[in-house]
Image (cartoon, rainbow, N blue to C red):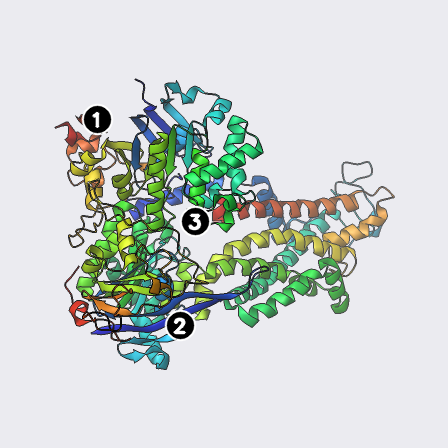
Amino acid sequence: MTPLLEIDRLTTRYVSARGARVVEAVSDISFRLEAGETLGIVGESGSGKTTLALSIMRLLPPGARIAAGAVRFEGEDLLAKSDGEMRRLRGKRIAMILQDPMASLNPLFTVGDQVGESLRVHEGASRRTAWTRARELLTAVKIPAPEARVREYPHQLSGGMRQRIVGAIAISCEPRLLIADEPTTSLDVTIQAQYLNLLRDLQREHGLALIFITHNLGIVARMCDRVAVMYAGRLVEIGPVRRIFDAPAHPYTRALLESIPRLADARARLTAIDGQPPDLAALPVGCAFHPRCPKVEDRCRREVPTDIAVAEDHRARCWLAAR
Amino acid sequence: MSTPMSPSASPSRAASLTLAWRFAAFHAEGFPVLPTLILLVLVLTAVFANVIAPSDPEIGTLGERFRPPAWQVGGSEKYLLGTDHLGRDVLSRLIFGARVSMVVGLTAVLFAGAVGTALGILSGFLGGWVDQVIMRVTDTWLALPALTFAIFLAAVVGPSEMNIVIILGAVYWTRYARVIRGEVLSLRERDFVRLAIVAGCSKWTIMRRHILPNVLNSAIVLGTLMLGVVIVTEAALSFLGVGVPPPKPAWGLMLADGKKGLMAGYWWLTVLPGSCIMLMVLSANLLGDWLRVKLDPQLRQL
Amino acid sequence: MTLLEVDNLVKHFPVKGGFFTGGGVVRAVDGVSFRIEAGRTVGVVGESGCGKTTTAKVVLGLETPTSGTLRFEGADLQTLDAAGRRRYRRSVQAVFQDPFASLNPRMRVGAIITEPLVVHEQLARGEARERALRLLDVVSLPERSIDLFPHEFSGGQRQRIAIARALALEPKLIVLDEPVSALDVSIRAQILNLLRDLQARLGLAYLFITHDLAAVAYMSHTVAVMYLGKLVEFGPARAVATAPQHPYTRALFAAALPSHPDERREDVTLVGEVPSPLAPPPGCRFHTRCPVVMERCAREEPPLVHTDGRLVACHLYSPTPGVGPWQPQRAAPGSLTSPSFTTGGAP
């Protein structure tokens, strides 16, 4: 059976205005996503996780180019599609939720118009049907008093409420895949918990596949079935969440897990990762993590590690994983 | 995702990288080569006017009146760009005119800039009644039409180069005050200003060390843009006879003198100084526009 | 020894009326009392609008309190003379969240670090440089950093510079306002560990403000939980983090993200959102969202009472006159810390 989404050796580069600086933000990345599955993509700023999402959506900013690879969605190559075909796909089959709900909503339109917009664009629904549907969607994302809310404008709503509206817009055309880029970063702890619960409920009800882009391993632990760890544009490890948390194969994943304070065990001293995140324009030779790696060997300084299968459905780009 | 600005493992490598990057960026992205060259030539002309000019700009030979430029019939090698109604060499007058424009323009911009920036910082940082007073005065000032106001002042104090500078400064400082105040209002809320208060810096120290260096960029950009405005105003005042007093060779004055000859076909008396004014103002504006984009980190990121 | 004593702090911001709305008062901080002991960390947690940042600003002297007193080493700040205020300024420094906004982009690192020293001690150039080098060493930055500008550093390195600057005057208390929230995940542990090491080495006290519950548990000796301008729970970090008592604290820690997929939390999901601080609910401010709300919660404001080695402001733990044998001792303002946890073990 074909997976819902298959990324095959995808490479995306940013080229500066005069071509002087070429930055490979996404470098040779492959993974698959099955229908209804939740994949977490974790990485620090500059790791390429957002560029990866934008590459899948074909929403890259000018100056960024997909240099190689394929993105297959339901068996079809998205990179071969025309802009018009992509437009029809976005919002309908693949939806996206961004970090800042205020920037995602147009301040000049009512909630009802914005939630119904996709329906009108993609399904040719009338304004009236779109509004009726918008009310149902607001109920689905657990917004109290949807009758009144459809008539309100984004500035009249709280941050948590706005992000719910964005969620309602995302699911309005019943997409198969939802990409959420740091959807809860701007929310408070208790509002974040509400929102994560909501996303999980929506996913179960609609059989959505979810890609969760985050820097927060806690969100991954709570939400995801599988996790992909990115570092300096490369996918350094991918596998089932439990396995990655219990037996990470890549030293970066391990270090990341050990460097995060835990509520249950607050006394233990954190193991910090030395050094700074790398500059994508001047990556170290060999494995990009080697200057910060506690287990670095000679080979790491020379050769970029290949994708190595550690176990069933668990791969890592580390020479140590080969043994 | 944005590419990282300059995170790096070692500060020294980062330093050399940014330096190289800055150098490269200076050459790239629409740097206005021609306007800069023109301005440079004009500045050099102004500085070395007495070396370059073939003859005295203020004393003419009445017998050689209204000579056309050298390439026209009746022109002479001696007067490359012709002569005016008093038989003065137009080329020499243009060359010395550059000096007048430059001196008046630059000093007026500096004067207006210094006053406006200082008041803008005080207004924005101190707030309260200081802000109220300065901004009400600025509003009143801006409500007056700049040129009329300048003519009025010039008529009151009488024409001289020094007076022109003071008048232009007095008319245009408000533009700086407005822009700089806005900038200061946002700077004041930045964390490093808060931390300076926590560190025990006085208001004076904060304005001098933390606010002023951070508004200098805007002041320089504004200054470049204002240079054009100031030069045009100076030319207008001279044209109207309340600016640089004759026989000083100011471009505006030359234009005024030359307009009588326009109907008689003495085109070089108006077209040439007019072109000089246009070239200079256009160059200053283009350079200012480029600087504005270049020095504004928010625009630069786009 | 008590370093800073905050007693019944109130900070209200008047709001100008809009075209359609009347004016009002934002009750950012509404009667908060706590103590910071020398060499210890008090963590303040709460969601946006709870007043934690305003509290920090008042402590830093960036805002003047509407009412209430701050006592530093026993002396009331309001009665201090100029020299006393200067001493207070020297003793209390800060590190803010955004290392990109907290360093003047036009100053070299050396000048940034030594600015507080120059202001307070009129140091000679050479001496200032020497002090700057020593401070850079303390925060593990290379010596050559001294002549560079902030934009030449990454976020984590900048936060080290900010810490070095805060240390320059050898303060007794540093206010840390979300010091790692803007940093990359792999850098956070570096900075948290550095701050902990500095505390052990230099005997610093911290007022650590954050929304990251795990980080607060890692850093703090004592934790204060705030909700809508009020303190709802105040006690030893471990006790509060592992066995929260106030329904809000319980919900807050239940909402914290797990550190492992198998970690299960108590299932307390709060409904609704934080009410506006312009018009906080009467009685207990949390009663509109409280899962165990009682009838009296809407009427009476619960006092802070000693419960289970900490202070909790909730009617579940309040003494009910004449009911039952259980009569917890009511805490008097100004004596809010009990010795049992102000001298508690290291986190």
Would residue A159 appear left or right of A296 to someone viewing this image? right
Query: Relative to B240, is C185 on the left or the right?
Result: left
Q: Position of residue A183 (x, y in %)?
A: 38, 42
Q: Which sits earlier in the primary sequence, circle 3 or circle 1?
A: 3
Q: Quadrant of residue C21?
A: bottom right
* Same-subunit check for callouts 2 and 3: no
Q: In the picture provided, is A56 more to the left or to the right than C347?
A: right
Vertical arrangement, residue A258 with respect to residue C203, above or below: above
* Residue receiving disc 1: A313
Q: Which mark, by number, is residue B208?
A: none
Q: Label 3 neighbourhood size at 10 Å, few (<14), some (14-19), many (20+)?
A: many
- Evaluate whether residue A134 shows in this view: yes
Q: Residues within 10 Å of mark 1 (few under 14, many from 20)?
A: few
Seen as rendered, the residue at the extreme front is: C323
Q: Are marks 2 and 1 in contact (CB under 8 Å)?
A: no
Marks 3 and 1 sit apart, C-alpha to C-alpha, by 38 Å
* Three-letter code, disc 2: Pro
Number of residues whose C-alpha sits closer than 10 Å to that of mark 2, classed few (under 14), some (14–19) or many (20 or more) = many
Q: Callout 3: helix, strand or loop?
A: helix
Determine which quarter of the picture holds residue A96.
Answer: top left
Residue drawn at 20 percent across, 65 percent down: C202
Front position among marks 3 and 1: 3
Residue name at image x 26 percent, y 33 percent: A225
* Mark 2, residue position: C65
**Mark 2 belongs to which subunit?**
C
Report x, y in % for residue C299: 37, 67
Residue under label 3: A159
Residue B28 makes an appearance in the image: no
Q: Position of residue C100 (x, y in %)?
A: 38, 52
